[in-house]
Image (cartoon, rainbow, N blue to C red):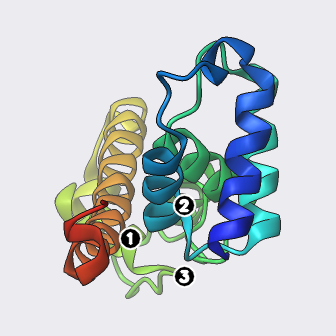
Amino acid sequence: MTKRETKCLLGLALANWPNMQDKSFDVETTAALWHKVLGHLPFGDAEAGLAKVLLTAKFFPTVAEVFEAVRSLRPDTSGVPPVEAAWDEVCRNLNPYAMPEWSHEAIRITVRRLGGIRALCESENHVADRAHFFKLYDLHLSREKDKILNSQAAALVSRAELKMIN
């Protein structure tokens, strides 16, 4: 996205909050920040994300809100099954005499953290196992998402132009 397109996005946001259009609001610095953080996104994606935020936001949007909206609008291409489908896969593989094949590494890691397939087969409380699986699986996925966000943030900070906005 170009700097001009970023200013266009900022103009759309400002149009939604007329009280932000006074002289005390520093448009140039805000536009520079938005461009530094959101500039790697395609303009169409950023515009759609901003539109989503504008539909519900009660306050002027932050770059984090726009970034999260863009992420939520993109289709999930990670191949990670939802937690319910992952648990169904675990239940289909509850056989202590066969080596399970998992469709995703996150399922294997979560089963291992629960004590392995044998422990799940021998368990007498599948309701608790299901609850623990859901919690651990979601925790694992959130940590993986954090790793991705951390690497994106590190890439932003490593760019020389972010060191000083002005």
What residue sits right under mark 2 in the picture?
86
Q: Is residue 126 visible?
A: yes
Kindly identify the amino acid type of the residue bearing the numbered disc 2: Ala
Q: As drawn, is 122 to the left or to the right of 101?
A: left
Which mark is in front, 2 or 1?
Answer: 1
Q: Relative to the observer, which residue lies in front, 34 or 155?
A: 34
Query: Gap in Å between the C-alphas at discs 3 and 1?
Result: 9 Å
From the top left corner, tell me how far across and down residue 102 is, in percent.
Answer: 48, 81
Neighbor class of circle 2 (other Cα within 10 Å; few <14, some 14-19, many 20+) is many
Label placed on residue 106: 1
Neighbor class of circle 1 (other Cα within 10 Å; few <14, some 14-19, many 20+) is some
What residue do we see at 52% from left, 64% from top? Answer: 35
Determine whether the residue tagged by mark 1 lies in a helix, strand or loop: helix
What residue do we see at 54% from left, 41% from top? Answer: 27
Whether tag 2 and tag 3 are in contact, CB under 8 A, the answer is no
Instruction: Please identify the residue farthest to the front as the structure is shown.
Output: 23
What residue sits right under mark 3 in the picture?
103
What residue do we see at 67% from left, 45% from top? Answer: 10
Whether tag 2 and tag 1 are in contact, CB under 8 A, the answer is yes
The answer to whether residue 29 is above or below residue 23 is: below
Q: Earlier in the sequence, mark 2 or mark 1?
A: 2
Q: Relative to the observer, which residue lies in front, 161 or 97?
A: 161
From the top left corner, tell me how far across and down residue 140 is, in percent.
Answer: 30, 58
Kindly identify the amino acid type of the residue bearing the numbered disc 1: Ala
Neighbor class of circle 3 (other Cα within 10 Å; few <14, some 14-19, many 20+) is few
Determine whether the residue tagged by mark 2 lies in a helix, strand or loop: helix
Label placed on residue 43: none
The answer to whether residue 16 is above or below residue 43 is: above
Q: Earlier in the sequence, mark 2 or mark 3?
A: 2
